[in-house]
Image (tube, rainbow, N blue to C red):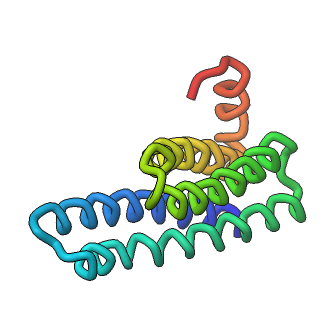
Amino acid sequence: MYYWLTHLFLAGVVVQIFLAGYGVFASAEGATEHQFVDNFLAHAAVGWLLGLLGLILLAVAVGGSLPGEAKKLNGLLFLLLVLQFVFAGVGATVTLIGGLHSVNAVVILIVGWLLLKHARAATRPGLATAANATTTHGSL
């Protein structure tokens, strides 16, 4: 289950990036405030779903037999998701904080990718050795 949830999460992050770009470009030329909000509704909805999925991933990781590093990464992911909501909420009034929303999204993507590597290693014995070797040598 964890294996598929990590894949779903990472796919959701890619969709989220697309929706953010869509919202920006659909609102670029003369959009009213109402149109601007409408252009970002899907981005907001997927964001909430990713937050829920992050919580589910954390619960499965803590309750499962994942290695300690994977559990820590899930905790970090959940923290980053909480920060993402804070940056989005505060960013409307403090644009510098709003800018951190994009940077944090990149970090979420990286952490999601690392979790996917752990999930693959945990479910496929041949990849477990490769993932451990990669982690040991410090490369992504």
Horizontally, residue 49 falls left or right of residue 37, namely: right
Residue 78 vs 67, above or below: the answer is below
How many badges with numbers are in the image?
0
Taking the spot 73% from the left edge, 70% from the top edge, the residue there is 56
x, y (%) of residue 22?
A: 25, 64
Pick the front one: 110 or 136: 110
Taking the spot 88% from the left edge, 56% from the top edge, the residue there is 65
Residue 76 vs 36, above or below: the answer is above
x, y (%) of residue 95?
A: 42, 49
Taking the spot 41% from the left edge, 63% from the top edge, the residue there is 16
Horizontally, residue 39 falls left or right of residue 84, namely: left
Pick the front one: 100 or 1: 100
Furthest residue in direction front, as rendered: 93
Horizontally, residue 9 falls left or right of residue 129, namely: left
x, y (%) of residue 57?
A: 72, 64
Pick the front one: 77 or 100: 100
